[in-house]
Image (tube, rainbow, N blue to C red):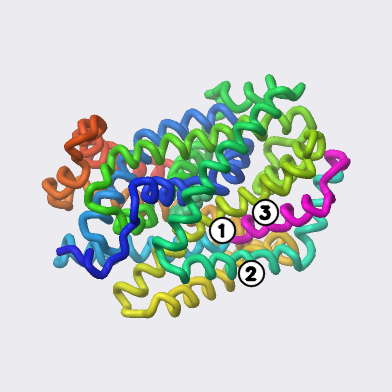
Amino acid sequence: MSNKSKQQLFATRLGVIAATVGSTVGLGNIWRFPYEAGVHGGGAFLIIYIFFILILGVPVLCAEFAIGRSTHSNVLGCFRMLKPHQPFWRIVGIIGVTSGVMILSFYSVIAGWTLEYFIASLKGDIAGRSTDEFHTMFGDFTVGMRPIVWTVVFLLINYCVIVRGVQKGVEKASNVLTPALMVLLIVFCINSLMMPGAAEGLKFLFKPDFSRITPAVVIGAMGQAFFSLSLGLGCMLTYASYFPDKTPLVRSATVTVGLDVMTALMAGILIFPVVFTYGFSPQEGPTLVFEVLPAIFSQLSGGWFWAPLFFLMLFLASLTSTISMSEIGIAWLTQERGMSRSKACVLVIAVAMVCGVACALSFSYWAGLKLPLVGEFNVFGFFDYTSSNVLLPLGGMLISIFAGWILDRTILRRELTHPRTLLSSLTPVIVFLLRYVSPVMILVIFIANI
Ligand code: TRP
């Protein structure tokens, strides 16, 4: 059943963890989490986000791992192999490939911003400015052509990595990057905790105000849980198809989730004290982190050194995430459509480039352009909202129904149970969540929102 012989595999246990953590840790934690938490009331958002990570994130991650590893196949191929007579399930693959490219497009815009700030901080443009100036600095940057150029540059860099193949590119890069980013974050968190606004910032982030919980907060937190764990579109499934059979899946899932949540929390601890110290608005939205980070570095001793280093790490963390997004489409094109890897890479990047430029324009020339039918969104907002808050949970719901009800129970148990790890004893809990909890919960949230 498996097509392992044709399939490249990650070489080492560390490679498996580094690549999955590399995919999950990225702008989702450091850019998207603080801005979503800011918009949705801090503590109220955090608590629901963590609830969803545990109740939806962990089981769906295990399901993606099990499906991917048991077939060693891509997001369309795996359903064909597991249930050849139920073509319906290939819809998960179609959602996956489509939303993978959508996310790659808008994500590359933000990753492009990290490049701009990397260069600006190298040139010393960040030092000695006031809060208002950081606001203006960002505004000046986004109205010009530079965001578009950086989006294109970022996608080209991404192309150069992915075209070299799975093991060589992804694994090597992730082994070093993710731990380094975490260490840097810890250093900066300590710095933020010493600021005058630290208490207020922490209170905002950690003290839940239940009166602020609305359907929008719930759906935002669910979308963020999926986005942050790279779940719902078969990204983790595709990576798991490169896992060796001896990888303990539940343990890998637990480590991935733990590190991912920790990074998001660190980003919050880093950002909110500064927001309150410098009088930024937590409700700022997608631009929040890019106005707040320069403020941190401008007052930090040795900021000229830390700022470029941090933006470089952020850029690299984005890269390990976009590599994984690109891989969904590439695995499908090469394995199902018989395309060469280099052609598949060109195709995926080309589509993402066209859509990415449209997203980049949403912060300048097309800022006022609201899409017909979805009235409140511009192109960027539409891509972000639809993929994260609609397509990912929808994909996640279908994946949990498939794993819980359709997939042969022996396959699921065989994949999740590992003789030498204690965490395998969680398997029955995961199966229960997949069958009865996650699909129902996602459906109820969808219906409540409509
Ligand atoms: N999880 C990544 C982050 O937090 C982004 C990401 C990578 C992603 N692959 C994905 C999001 C697949 C959704 C689906 O930055």
Give 313 or 284, whichever is nearer the viewer: 313
Mark 3 to mark 1 CA distance (whole Å): 22 Å
**Magenta: predominant secondary structure element?**
helix
Q: Which secondary structure, mark 1?
A: helix
Residue 225: percent from the left, percent from the top? Answer: 45, 41
User: How many C-alpha atoms fall within 10 Å of the one at disc 1: few (<14), some, or many (≥20)?
Assistant: some
In the rendered image, residue 111 lying in the magenta stretch gets the answer: yes
**Magenta residue span:** 107-132
Residue named by callout 1: 382
Residue name at image x 57 percent, y 42 percent? 181
In primary-sequence order, the first of circles 2 and 1 is 2
Q: Is residue 71 left or right of residue 306?
A: left
Residue 256: percent from the left, percent from the top? Answer: 40, 41
Give 203 or 177, whichever is nearer the viewer: 177
Proximity of marks 2 and 3: CB atoms separated by less than 8 Å: no
Q: Is residue 69 left or right of residue 344?
A: left
Q: Which secondary structure, mark 2?
A: helix
* Numbered mark located on residue 258 in the image: none
Q: Amino acid at mark 3?
A: Thr
Q: Quadrant of the N terminus?
A: bottom left
Residue named by callout 2: 152
In primary-sequence order, the first of circles 2 and 3 is 3
Q: Amino acid at mark 1?
A: Phe
The quarter holding residue 50 reads top left
Q: Is residue 356 left or right of residue 4?
A: right
Mark 2 to mark 1 CA distance (whole Å): 20 Å
Nearer to us of marks 2 and 1 is: 2
Residue named by callout 3: 114
